[in-house]
Amino acid sequence: MNHFKVLRNLSFGRPILTIYDVTKLCNQRCPMCNIWKTRSESLDLTAIEEQAKQLSAFGMGYVYLQGGEPTLRKDLIAIVDIFIKYGIKPTVLSNGILVKKELAEELAARPCNLMLSVDSLIPERFAHMRGRDSLQKVLDNVAVLRNIPHRSNWSVTTTVSAISELDDVLNIRQWALDNGFMHAIRPYVFVKGVAGAEVAELAADRQKVLNIFEHYIEIAKKENYLAYLVYREHIRYLKGESMPMCDAYCRSLLMKENGALAPCIEFPDEQAGLSGFAERYKELKPQLAACNRDTPCFYNDAREIGVLWRHKLEIALHLPVILLQLKRYGNFF
């Protein structure tokens, strides 16, 4: 990775992260997601390489390979290798159903993060949240993955909603740690429903979600300081406080499955090219600012870079501790 280009982009308010929908096909039917309901017109490897080359030249340092479910693509490892070739570190975001030993070993041999999404260890609740009764498949896969040494960060993320229970979330955390994964939580987000569908029962009790985050931030303060900084912002969001400008287009952008670039997941039809970036960002900023003010969200890509960048002095002061934690959990960067 060209760290100089990444630092330059951060300093001048240019994106360093691409969220790439490698496919919109999915093998789950989560009620909180609208993505699997849409058509998928995926790029071939030649087109992906051309995009990766341009993203690298722009200074992009990271890419989230998501979907849909990215492991449905048989050429996923080839896609990972393309981005690595151009100095862009990938993170594969998966539901874990198809992350078998062979695929995991391929990912583990590369500078590639792996993020599995698991919202409950209670079978009935998992099936309710994911639309499919596939928990045992995920558990069986992870039991095998625990014995695979890996070079980068492997994590389990949990979406915390009004039907989540603290004991269940803590059990997921312990299960993740026991199997060599970091654990992180995220609040349920729906906003306009472009990607996250509004489900009344999941959004009903924000205070309950807030209570889980307030418990979790105390753990993170001792064990994962970068997560602690992000959880502080999660709590602000859950309390309905005014949020700083999000990362849309200034820190991250969306690459749709057909290769088109957009400022974020909530504005998939707005063009957001790399050439003439400054002018286009100036045009889009009022619209993005209004969205941030009126319907703020907290998608994984929407705020985390900005949170860490705004707290870079605090990070510097805690750097020895953070470096030890990165060694423990695997270096995300």
Image: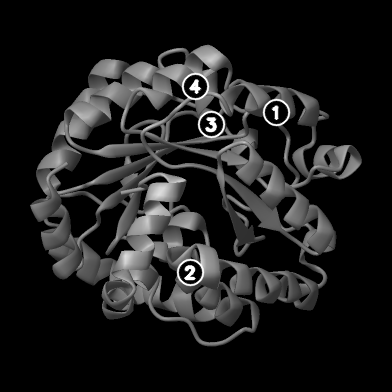
The amino acid at mark 1 is Val
Marks 2/1 in contact by CB < 8 Å: the verdict is no
Mark earlier in primary sequence (2, 4): 4
Q: Sort mark 3 into few (<14), some (14-19) or many (20+) by Cα contacts within 10 Å.
A: many
Q: Residue at x 10, y 42 (%)?
A: 57
| In this rendering, the label closer to the viewer, 2 or 3 | 2
Distance (Cα) linking label 2 and label 3: 28 Å
Q: Sort mark 2 into few (<14), some (14-19) or many (20+) by Cα contacts within 10 Å.
A: many
| In this rendering, the label closer to the viewer, 3 or 1 | 1
Mark earlier in primary sequence (4, 3): 3
- The tag on residue 230 is 2
Q: Sort mark 1 into few (<14), some (14-19) or many (20+) by Cα contacts within 10 Å.
A: some
Identify residue for label 3: 24
Distance (Cα) linking label 2 and label 1: 27 Å
Q: Residue at x 17, y 54 (%)?
A: 6
Residue 125 visible (yes or no): yes
